[in-house]
Image: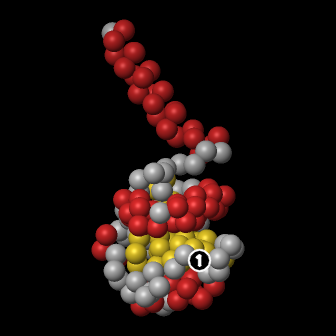
Amino acid sequence: MKRRSWIAFLIGSVISVTTAGPLLGQTNPATGGTPAEAKAMLERAVQAVKADKQRALAAFTLGTDGFRQGDLYVFCIGPDGKVDAHPNPELIGVDARGLSDKNGKHFAVEMLNVAQPGTFAEVTYSWPRLLGAEPIPKTSFVTKVDDQVCGVGYYH
């Protein structure tokens, strides 16, 4: 009987710890990050591209080196308008200028137009979570670094 009580206590503790994070102001990996965390990841991404562009693009796509945390990830569009880095391998090489959200907004065209070196512009659109099917509101911070337009977005 003591063993069952101990197991019930452990299960209850795990449930409490995994559900308390959002109440304590922590990021819930199941739902994503904050605007501040998205900006911080983009700042790190800019430095990575400046240091070694090809290695950085690979790390962004694979989500290594801390470039994927919950729903936060880095994406980059090359000078030809094609996706050079994204965690969804089906998007690599796709002409981003043809992408549109559920409302018909050509968000990547806007990203390409507003991205400037040294600043973070914001573009809001609808996009599915990596493992989700239904597009939901998302805001991405975008910047130009080298010949890439890179961004990190958070879901609302």
Q: Which element is circle 1 on?
A: strand
Q: In this view, does 57 lie to the left or right of 48?
A: left
- Residue under the image location 41 percent in, 70 percent down: 85
Q: How many marks?
A: 1
- Residue under the image location 36 percent in, 59 percent down: 62
The N terminus: image quadrant: top left
| Residue 128 image point, x, y percent | 43, 71
| Residue 78 image point, x, y percent | 45, 81
Q: Is residue 147 left or right of residue 36?
A: left
Q: Which of 28 and 99 is in front in this view?
A: 99
Looking at the image, can residue 139 be seen? no
- Residue under the image location 55 percent in, 85 percent down: 112
| Residue 46 image point, x, y percent | 57, 65
**Which residue corresponds to mark 1?**
144
16 is higher (above) or lower (below) than 5: below
Residue at the farthest top position = 2
Q: Is residue 19 left or right of residue 61?
A: right
Q: Is residue 25 left or right of residue 12?
A: right
Residue type beneath disc 1 = Lys
Q: Which colour scheme is used?
A: secondary structure
